[in-house]
Image: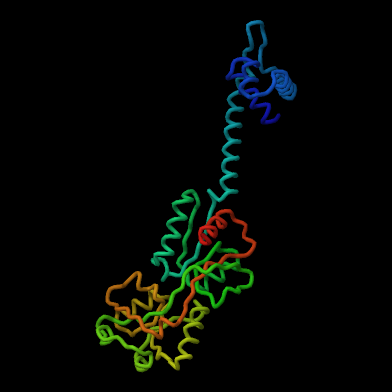
Amino acid sequence: MEFRQLHYFVAVVEAGSISAASRQVHVAQPAVTRQIKLLESELETPLFDRHARGIQLTVAGRALYDDARELLGRREQIKSRLSSLGSGLTGRLSLGITVTHLWVPHVARLLGSYRQRYPRVAFEVFPWLSGPQLERLREDRLDAGILYLDSDAQPGLATHLLHRDHLILAVPETSTWAASPPRRLEELVDEDFVWGFRHVSPGYFDRVTAHFQRHHFHPRVVQYGADNIAILSMVAAGLGIAIVPAASSWHPMPGIRFHRMDELDECDMPLWVAWKQGNESPALKNFIHMVDA
């Protein structure tokens, strides 16, 4: 029993005759007749009573009609679903992003545009730091990541430069630096700093450390935070000052003042989109296409 035979059978029932059905499906009448007879032969039962005034469904024919319509409808649903999956109109996309950059306008526009263009894709966004993102990308537990990398040469990953960031100073608004910001890093040598752990974002940590070494600056770290949100919360509480990505200022926190410094502007902090080479997900391909645009 073929879908083509069921299609012809339903057309005959709904058109009322084989001749009318042949015109409807654009197939010669003898071909439609032959397929109906093959269907009856396979099922070993007549589907139509044929008489001078036309044809009429048998009991078996009436039962098959309902099932045939359901099967043909289900077939179209499957075809449509698979076509949507293959073109990335449906499916799933998991994206990691550093918490700091969730509010950066360029990044927010990218996420919003993808959601608007592909509303039927299950779009999952995870606020993870660079280290956890890299680990999940390489283990195929994440489709793409927006993160800091020390370079675009990442074994097993493809990358695309998304945004160039720099560093910025964050101080409590009660600090003397709030009203009279420093001009040079050397002015901050005696200050208490809130810092991040290297293992959660090695690329970011090493890049910042190398930049400070070039300026012979060694911050006195007294507190550690798990991510930039935690670090800034401690700054707001007056536990110290911090140097964070400039993108942090797009989502200002109460109790904090941000200050730009020339020596911090010089530290290039490129933000990359990375994904596993060989990931053939159509939903991912559509996302990367929007990143490239």
Q: Position of residue 215 (x, y in %)?
A: 45, 91
The reply, left or right, for residue 61 in relation to residue 217 is right
- When the figure is inspected, residue 234 is found, relative to residue 101, above or below; the finding is below
The residue located at (42%, 57%) in the rendering is 112
Of residue 104 and residue 53, the one placed in the foreground of this image is 104
Q: Report the residue at 53% width, 54% height from top.
A: 92
One can see residue 44 in this view: no
Quadrant holding the N terminus: top right
Relative depth, front residue between 117 and 219: 117
Q: Is residue 50 visible?
A: yes
Above or below residue 267? Residue 144 is above
> Which residue is at the front of the view, 143 or 225?
143
Up/down of 160 relative to 223, above or below: above
Left or right of 4: which side holds 119? left
Query: Residue 30 appears in which quarter of the rendering?
Result: top right
Would you identify the image quadrant in which residue 42 lies?
top right
Give x and y (percent) for residue 90: 53, 49
Residue 239 percent coordinates (x, y):
32, 84
Q: Position of residue 152 (x, y in %)?
A: 57, 73
Count of numbered marks: 0
Q: Residue at x 41, y 81 (%)?
A: 265
Please state which of residues 92 and 65 is positioned toward the viewer in this rendering.
Answer: 92
